[in-house]
Amino acid sequence: MYRPEIKVFDCTIRDGGLINNYKFTDDFVKAVYRACCEAGVDFIELGKKLAESDDYNRKDYGKWNFCDDDDVQRVIDSYECENPPLVAVMYDVGRVDISALKPRDNTPFDMIRTACYVPDIDKGLDLAIRCKDLGYLTTINIMAASAAIENDLLEALAQVNDCKEVDYLYLVDSYGAFYSEQVSHYLNLYKKYAPDKELGFHAHNNQQLGFANTQQAIIEGVNMLDATINGIGRGAGNCNLELLLMFLKNPKFDVRPIYKTIQEDFVPLRQEIEWGFNDIYGISGCMNQHPRAAMKFRADKKNQDNAYDFFVESTRLDDTDIA
Amino acid sequence: MYRPEIKVFDCTIRDGGLINNYKFTDDFVKAVYRACCEAGVDFIELGKKLAESDDYNRKDYGKWNFCDDDDVQRVIDSYECENPPLVAVMYDVGRVDISALKPRDNTPFDMIRTACYVPDIDKGLDLAIRCKDLGYLTTINIMAASAAIENDLLEALAQVNDCKEVDYLYLVDSYGAFYSEQVSHYLNLYKKYAPDKELGFHAHNNQQLGFANTQQAIIEGVNMLDATINGIGRGAGNCNLELLLMFLKNPKFDVRPIYKTIQEDFVPLRQEIEWGFNDIYGISGCMNQHPRAAMKFRADKKNQDNAYDFFVESTRLDDTDIA
């Protein structure tokens, strides 16, 4: 039996873009959109909507970091679908221009997801309120919950709970540090301190637990589930959408279009960019570290598999005299 | 806090041997043994102990398929260790010669693990009894529980429970088909129908759930945990020993020697043989299939990543007219 409240949220382009500077071809983005349409996925996130500047421009940072309305509309228009997914885009606190956002009726977007760390929760809520005023569905994705001081996190959760303009509140395992017991622990805090909010979960696969932890979130009552095709995403990547769809029993889902785009579009992409579990990300996740050290280590192709060296290097980070 | 009853069982050579016909070099086996010694692992399984014949000979099938006493003793003698792991070897029902087994005091082995399918449970128990009579620790590893008719499985569990010569009873997810909820379901059956037995769990990683399911087994009270270095094993491989050791909090474990052998011995091996999760094994696991179809599909290097084709092929297996 399936739980009809469960929604599947594809963030393939948005999270995958973190490893290729959002330089997916239009054809690739259209293929992902089409696969999600055919598979019955509920939401699709096509990138970030950051403010453009001279330093931070489309040429260097890729068009899906900015998600101009026209670019996104062209993707949507490329495939006709009876029940297309709702289209989302991500806002990063401090890097967006909300004054440029048009009302929902005049854009291709249905949802704006706002990502922020605990200390920026007020800025995040401000963005969410403004987005809601423009008619959008909204989320607050609190990043790196595993690295927050718990009391600060609880205060942030209570603030989100009091903000009626937030539709979904996300637990995000940014560092891929959670075991299932931590998923339960944090979600119990979320349910206690933000009891009025519908919850979402966003995993990372550092310890090969992205899919398993998403299942644990389901068990804990979470109904909004992030996943990416083939698990693409920064570092160890995310929960694999195709595995998740096979786990869920809702007859509206069809996994075949996802495997079709994997075969046709993702297998070739794997020759160009790397994602997924490896020893280095496993250590990084277990140590509850930001993945930047692991990514830097992997960038040195000659030594990228030296797991022992990385382990020693990572533990020695704590050796410096700060007691 | 850790659970002192938990034992970690390394089956790197035994399960890894399934993908290279047990043709590990002596140096490789010694490196694995040394790493397990230094890491504080409780048990190590150095291969199978099958009966040799003209057809089934050491040259074609690799010496670790036969585990002659002298070969194993040389490995043990290669590294001195205060608390070395107990040494195990695997018996396959129908492929062994128990009359050739000497008493425990005269061999390098401490434990004989007997693997059998549900229909062969009586043969498996017969072997376990004879091994116990010779002084060995014994296990019954019931393979492919996910594919057994449940009532037959329950009868087998009750038989094992009544057999005092069996020290450990294993739940084995041979097809990598379990989600955590199935791990709990089956373990509840095991606890109900074999309440007197200490339980073990052996995962496969087809759906990236090998490590997660092993955690679930711990939650359900299992104290004997199989794992392999770097997750090596047939098809998608097993629970990664290094991830498991980092999860467990027992101070006797040290994961560094495991990462050292990964860096020095396993990374080069990855150039020669393949193991670990991929799309094909994911589909195979979700469909609760024996991995032979997936392995055959992967063997065709040109088309090995055609996940959509494999999905269609796999589902059409059910199309034949057998209703």
Image (tube, coloured by chain):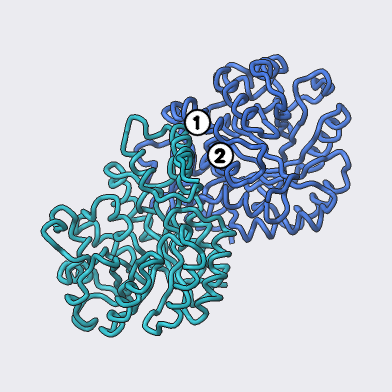
Chain colours: A cyan, B blue
Tag shown at residue A244:
none
In the picture, measured across the screen, residue B81 lies left or right of residue B307, that is right
Q: Residue furthest left?
A: A54
Which amino acid is tagged 2?
Glu
- Give the quadrant of residue B14: top right
Instruction: Name the residue tied to disc 2.
Output: B242
The crowding category of the residue bearing disc 1, from other C-alpha atoms within 10 Å (few below 14, some 14 to 19, many at least 20), is: many
Front residue of A323 and A47? A323
Q: Which residue is painted at 47% across and 25% down in the image?
A: B264
Q: Amino acid at mark 1?
A: Ile
The residue depicted at 66 percent of the width and 34 percent of the height is B41
Q: Secondary structure under badge 2?
A: helix
Question: Residue at the location (67% across, 31% down)?
Answer: B44
User: Could you tell me if the residues under marks 1 and 2 are in contact, i.e. CB atoms within 8 Å?
Assistant: yes
Letter of the chain that mark 1 sits on in the rendering: B
Q: Quadrant of the C terminus of chain B?
A: bottom right
Where's residue A256, x and y in %?
39, 60
Q: Secondary structure at mark 1?
A: helix
| Residue A311 in view, yes or no | yes
Check residue B262 in the rendering and tell me which mark sits there, or answer none: 1
